[in-house]
Image (cartoon, rainbow, N blue to C red):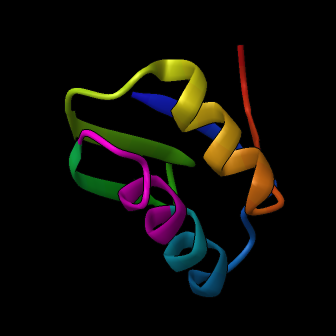
């Protein structure tokens, strides 16, 4: 699970989901806007997930 910072609307949510799903090894990604959390299934490196979120314009809490 990743804590996503900077999301304010459903467009943000969709953008983060799309970014996470583009990471090799990700089987699925679900982003909860209200909780500001992303749950990712599959085999993907955490640093690659963080980079994808950051490249989409958001950040991941430590």
- Residue at 55% x, 71% y: name it: 13
- Residue at 43% x, 45% y: name it: 38
Q: Is residue 43 above or below residue 17?
A: above
User: On the picture, is 5 further left or further right than 52?
Assistant: right
Displayed quadrant of residue 11 = bottom right
Q: Is residue 15 above or below residue 49?
A: below
Nearer to me, 41 or 36: 41
The spot of residue 45 in percent (x, y) is 43, 21
Magenta stretch holds residue 35: no
Magenta stretch holds residue 24: yes
Nearer to me, 38 or 28: 28
The spot of residue 12 in percent (x, y) is 66, 75
- Residue at 66% x, 49% y: name it: 53
Q: Is residue 10 above or below residue 34?
A: below
The spot of residue 56 in percent (x, y) is 74, 62
**Which residue is most to the top?**
62
**Which residue is most to the bottom?**
11
User: On the picture, is 60 further left or further right than 36?
Assistant: right
Q: Quadrant of the N terminus?
A: top left
How many marks can you see?
0
The spot of residue 33 in percent (x, y) is 52, 63
Q: Quadrant of the C terminus?
A: top right
Q: Which residues are magenta?
A: 17-25
Displayed quadrant of residue 39 = top left
Nearer to me, 50 or 32: 50
């Amino acid at each position: 699970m990743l804590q996503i910072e900077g999301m304010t609307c459903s467009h943000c949510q969709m953008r983060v989901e799309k970014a996470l799903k583009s990471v090799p090894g990700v089987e699925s990604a679900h982003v909860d806007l209200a909780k500001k959390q992303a749950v990712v299934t599959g085999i993907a490196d955490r640093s690659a997930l963080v980079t994808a979120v950051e490249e989409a314009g958001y950040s991941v809490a430590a």
